[in-house]
Image (cartoon, rainbow, N blue to C red):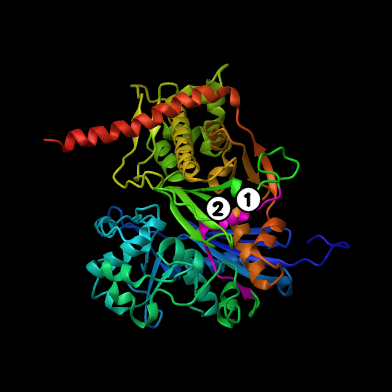
Amino acid sequence: MPGGDEEPRSYYVGVDVGTGSVRAALVDQRGTLLAFADQPINQWGPQFNHHEQSSEDIWAACCVASKKVVQGVNLQQIRGLGFDATCSLVVLDKEFRPLPVNHEGDSHRNIIMWLDHRAVSQVHRINETKHSVLQYVGGVMSVEMQAPKLLWLKENLRETCWDKAGHFFDLPDFLSWKATGVTARSLCSLVCKWTYSAEKGWDDSFWKMVGLEDLVTDNYSKIGNQVLPPGASLGSGLTPEAAEDLGLPPGIAVAASLIDAHAGGLGVIGADVKGHGLACEGQPVTSRLAVICGTSSCHMGISKNPIFVPGVWGPYFSAMVPGFWLNEGGQSVTGKLIDHMVQGHAAFPELQAKATARRQSIYAYLNSHLDLIKKAQPVGFLTVDLHVWPDFHGNRSPLADLTLKGMVTGLKLSQDLDDLAILYLATVQAIAFGTRLIIEAMESAGHSINTLFLCGGLSKNPLFVQMHADITGMPVVLSQEVESVLVGAAILGACASGDFASVQEAMAKMSKVGKVVFPRHEDKRYYDKKYQVFLKLVEHQKEYAAIMKGD
C-alpha cells in the first residue's frame, strides 16, 4: 500500500451479491478500489419462470470473496462493511433455518430470485384491488416484487413453507442480519419492494385485502418491524462468528443495506463533475439519471418532492439518497437479452472461435467487426432496415405490461457474422430506445434530466455507452471506478463507521468522474426516425394481440 505523509488510510469492505456471482472490494476513504474478488453462486430453474438460489451458498461465497480482498491488509484500518444484493426473497423458519420455495421440498433452495415470474396470477389479482399503495409503484405492481411471491408461497407451498416460516427477508437484509444478528430491515428494500411507507409504515388494509393478513400479526415480525435508513449502523457491528467467516475484525460497523441497483446509483450519482463541460454542473443532483445496467437495467432519478410517474416505480422517500424521493424505471432484461440474441445466432460458434483466437471478449470482437463493415457511414446506420423491440421478458417501465414480447423486423436468409453483428447492434440500440422512452415518461411527469450516469457491466461496453448518448441526446458520465456498485456498498460501510457525517458527504468524496461520452448530434435525425419505428413496433404488437383475441 502506498505510504508517504498522507492521512492514514481508512478502508471499507463492500460486498455486492448479483444474479450470478458475489463480488467484494476493499475501498479507501477517497473511493479508490484497492482489491477486488468475485465468486460464482448457484442458480436453479426447476421449471419455466421459476428461478431459485440458496442463502447458505450465497453467504459462503460472500465469505470467500471477503477473505480474498483483505489479504495482506492491516485489519485495524478496516472501519466498516456494507452489503448490497438483488431484491430476491429469502425464506427462513422460526429458528432461522432455510425453507423450500419449490415443490421438490429442497430446503437448500430457499430463495425466490428477483427475476422469477412464477407469481403472474397473484400479481394480477393484487393489481385488480387498485389499492392506494399501488400508486407508489407506478400504478401497477410488478411480478418481481415481494407481495405476489409471498402470496404464491401461501397458495402453493402452505404446509412445507408458509406455515413454518418465521422470517421473510429481502436478500440485502438477510446479509446484514447474518453479519450482525440484527433483524432490522433497510428502508430501501421495504419501501421499494414490499409496499412499506417511510412516513406511514405498513398498511394493514393492503395485506388483508390481498389475502396475506397473517403477516400483520405480531406487529409484522415476519417481514420487519424495525426499519433503518441505508448506511445506518446495525446493532453492535460484526458478530465474532460472522467476523471469522468473513475474515474481518469483530465489532466493525455494519450498515443497513441497499438493493444492488440502488448501490450503483449511490456510487455514481453524487460525483463532482466540475470541469467536464456538463449541463448538470452547478445544477441540483435531481438533473442526473443513474442507469445501472447489467443482467437487467434500472433507471434511478431523484427529486426533492414526490413525482408520480405512470409505469415507473416510486416515488420512494429516502430509499437511495436520504431526504430525496426516488423514481425507479427499469428494463427486465438487457445484458441477458444481448447474450440471448448473440448466443442463439447461427454464427455464434464462428464468433467464439474468432474472438478466442484474438484473445478478445465476444463483444469487443463484435464492436471491432462493426467498425470494419460500416465503411464510411456511422456505425449506428447499419441498422437502417433492422429494428428490435426488446421486451423479451415483458415491459417493466414505462408500459408496465408483463404480456409484451420481443420483436425483430428486417430479417434476411443470410446468417453470417455480419448479420450477427448487425443484430447485436440493433439489440443494443433497442435497449437505448427503451431508456429514452423511460426518460420521456419521467420528464412528462415532472422530472428534469440532462445527464446520464452509467455503471454496471454493460457500461464497460463502449458501443452500449455511445448508443445511449446518441439515442437519448444526453452526455453519459462513467465513473473513474468501473465497479460503482461496490463503491456504493463501501459508501454504506463508511457511513456506518461514522467517518462521514452523511451519505451525501460520502458520495461526494468517494465517487469520481472517469470518462464523459458526448452524443453525436449530427446523427440525431437518423435516431429520431428509428425511435418512431420503435414506438410503432409496440403499437403494432398490441394490434396483433387484439386481432387474435377478437371474434
Is residue 142 left or right of 87 when viewed as pictured?
left
Mark 1, secondary structure of its residue: helix
Res 545 visible:
yes
**Residue 270 lies in the magenta-colored region:** yes
Residue 535 higher or lower than 488, as above or below: above
Quadrant the C terminus occupies: top left
**Range of the magenta residues?**
253-272
**Residue 207 lies in the magenta-colored region:** no
| Kind of residue sitting beneath label 1 | Val
Residue 352 higher or lower than 52, as above or below: above
Along the polypeptide, which appears first: circle 1 or circle 2? 1
Residue occupied by mark 2: 302
Name the residue rendered at 45%, 24% in the picture. Answer: 529
Residue occupied by mark 1: 285
Circles 1, 2 touching at the beta carbon (< 8 Å):
yes
Quadrant the N terminus occupies: bottom right
Name the residue rendered at 77%, 66% in the picture. Answer: 9
User: Could you say where residue 32 lies in the image, as x and y percent from the top left?
Assistant: 71, 56
Packing grade of label 1 (10 A; few <14, some 14-19, many >=20) is: some
User: Could you say where residue 189 lies in the image, as x and y percent from the top left?
Assistant: 47, 65
Most foreground residue, 267 or 398: 398
Q: Which residue reaches farthest left?
A: 551
Label 1 and label 2: CA atoms lie apart by 8 Å
